[in-house]
Image: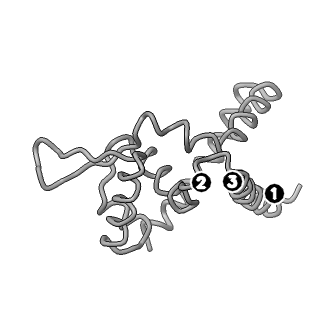
Amino acid sequence: MDLRKSLDTFYYSTALCDLRLMNRKLVDENITYNSLLYLEIIFSMNGRCTASKLAELLNVSKPGVTLKINELIKQGLVTKTTDPEDRRKNYLSVNEDAIPKYKIYRHQDNEAIRRITQRYTPEEVDMFCEMLDMISDINFEEINEG
């Protein structure tokens, strides 16, 4: 088993699958791959995402992020909520009604989870989760250094 090849194939197949699903119009045609990236980040931050944090994470200008956020708000995909304690701060969240519109492209993840949990023991699944978390930690270290 070649770990490098398996990891490269995983990243390649994931990106390719996402793009092909989008091209088959399984998601709203107005949702671009870039928009999906923003939605995933906003969703994963559980209501604690700000435009400044997005700009920092993506290493793009705050005005560029603001344009994208305004586009997502106009499409009804994202909502902006003012922090009651600091009115200068706005938190972003994915509109609950919009989640099914953009999450459909992740159906392959659900199938992978189903197959993995059927085939492997809970201990093996825990070990796999540990490995995935290690990869994520390394990626976040790189993000934070950059």
Q: Find residue 120 and report its horizontal and vertical position in percent.
A: 79, 29
Q: Evaluate if marks 2 and 1 touch, with contact meaning CB atoms under 8 Å apart.
A: no
Q: Quadrant of the N terminus?
A: bottom right
Q: Which residue is mark 1?
A: 6
Crowd tier of the residue under label 3, counting other residues whose Cα lies within 10 Å: few below 14, some 14–19, many 20 or above? some
**Tag of residue 63:** none
Apparent side of residue 119 relative to residue 68 in the rendered image (left or right): right
Q: Nearer the viewer, residue 24 or 95?
A: 24
Q: Quadrant of residue 115?
A: top right
Question: Considering only order in the chain, which callout, 1 or 2, is on the residue closer to the N terminus?
Answer: 1
The type of residue carrying mark 1 is: Ser
Q: Which residue is mark 2?
A: 29
The type of residue carrying mark 3 is: Asp
* Figure coloring: one colour
Q: Quadrant of residue 97?
A: top left
Q: Nearer the viewer, residue 134 or 116?
A: 116
Crowd tier of the residue under label 2, counting other residues whose Cα lies within 10 Å: few below 14, some 14–19, many 20 or above? few
Q: Which residue is mark 3?
A: 18
- Going 36% across and 44% down the picture, which residue do you hit? 93
Q: CA distance from mark 1 to mark 3?
A: 18 Å
- Going 58% across and 48% down the picture, which residue do you hit? 28
Q: CA distance from mark 2 to mark 3?
A: 13 Å
Q: Give the number of the mark in front: 2 or 1.
A: 2
